Image (cartoon, helix red, strand yellow):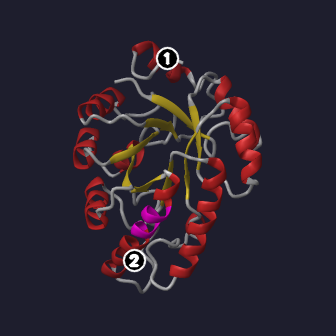
Amino acid sequence: MQWKLAANLSMLFTEQPLLERIAAAAQADFDGVEVQFPYGLPASDLQAELQRQGMPLVLFNLPAGDLMDGGPGLAAVPGRETAFAQSLQQALDYADVLQPQKVNVLPGRLARGVSEAQALDTLEHNLRLAAEAFAPLGVAVVCEAINRLDMPGFLLASSAELAAMLARVAHPNLSAQLDLYHMARMGEPVALSVQQLAGQIGHVQFADAPGRGAPGSGELDFRAAFQALDGADYRGWLAAEYRAAEAETDWLAWLAAWRAAGWVAPR
């Protein structure tokens, strides 16, 4: 199988303003782009630049409240249902203009004073709400597990935990966002991660582990990952979400090598 490659514009080309990163990704030979949180710019400006560069928008996240500042976020916190509904509406408004293929709901951290059972119940409710809301737009919803080394207290941190939540929600418009880096940081063999989520993988992100750098900078076995994804009949995108080292002279060398090896589709 040959997959298409997306650049995560929140992590890559960060020396440029967000809008200019779309052209940078196109010039660097990516097939599409994703962005973590697009809400700092008007959706119409982003859409105009995406069309100008001929780059599809693969994915963006729902607003996550205080998650990126160390808080628990919105999706799994009892009492924050109204705030989650507001974030959902904002994402729907952006999706109506930007027409992404997928949106990601971040589960967030376990909030202080909240039991795990309460948090999981709230997350289940909110994921079902999001899956229903985006279905009429033709936008699929994904949910992501994040390792507890980088984000202590994260509610879903393994492929098994993510699979269990998908089973609870059981909605046809909800699937898994599998981040190979986060699962590697949790000590999961890549084949196990894929096996746990096989048939339910809606999107794949990657960075090498343990440093979250470019492929080849760490210990993650990408060949094994691609073999496992192919065996699981995954047909979605691969999205680069890593930190480019400033001192690295050719931090995109992996991209040309992957195309030459036939791992990703030629442009």
Residue at 48% across, 42% down: 211
The residue under label 2 is which amino acid type? Thr
Query: In the image, is residue 193 part of the stretch drawn in magenta?
Result: no
Asked which secondary structure carries label 1, the reply is loop
Q: Are marks 1 and 2 in contact (CB under 8 Å)?
A: no
Residue at 65% across, 56% down: 94
Q: Which residue is mark 1?
A: 266
Splitting the image into 4 quarters, where does residue 126 fall?
bottom left
Q: Which residue is mark 2?
A: 122
20 sits left or right of 244 in the view: right
| Residue farthest toward the front in the current orientation of the protein | 136
Predominant SS along the magenta part:
helix
Q: Closer to the N terminus: mark 1 or mark 2?
A: 2
Residue 187 pos. (x, y %): 30, 48
Query: In the image, is residue 132 part of the stretch drawn in magenta?
Result: yes
Measured along the vertical axis of the image, is residue 193 above or below residue 162? above
Residue at 50% across, 73% down: 72
202 sits left or right of 164 in the view: right
Stretch of the chain drawn in magenta: 127-133
Residue 45 pos. (x, y %): 77, 47
Measured along the vertical axis of the image, is residue 168 above or below residue 18? below
Asked which secondary structure carries label 2, the reply is helix
In whole angstroms, how far apart are the C-alphas of marks 1 and 2? Answer: 43 Å
Residue 134 pos. (x, y %): 49, 59
The residue under label 1 is which amino acid type? Pro
Check residue 71 in the rendering and tell me which mark sits there, or answer none: none
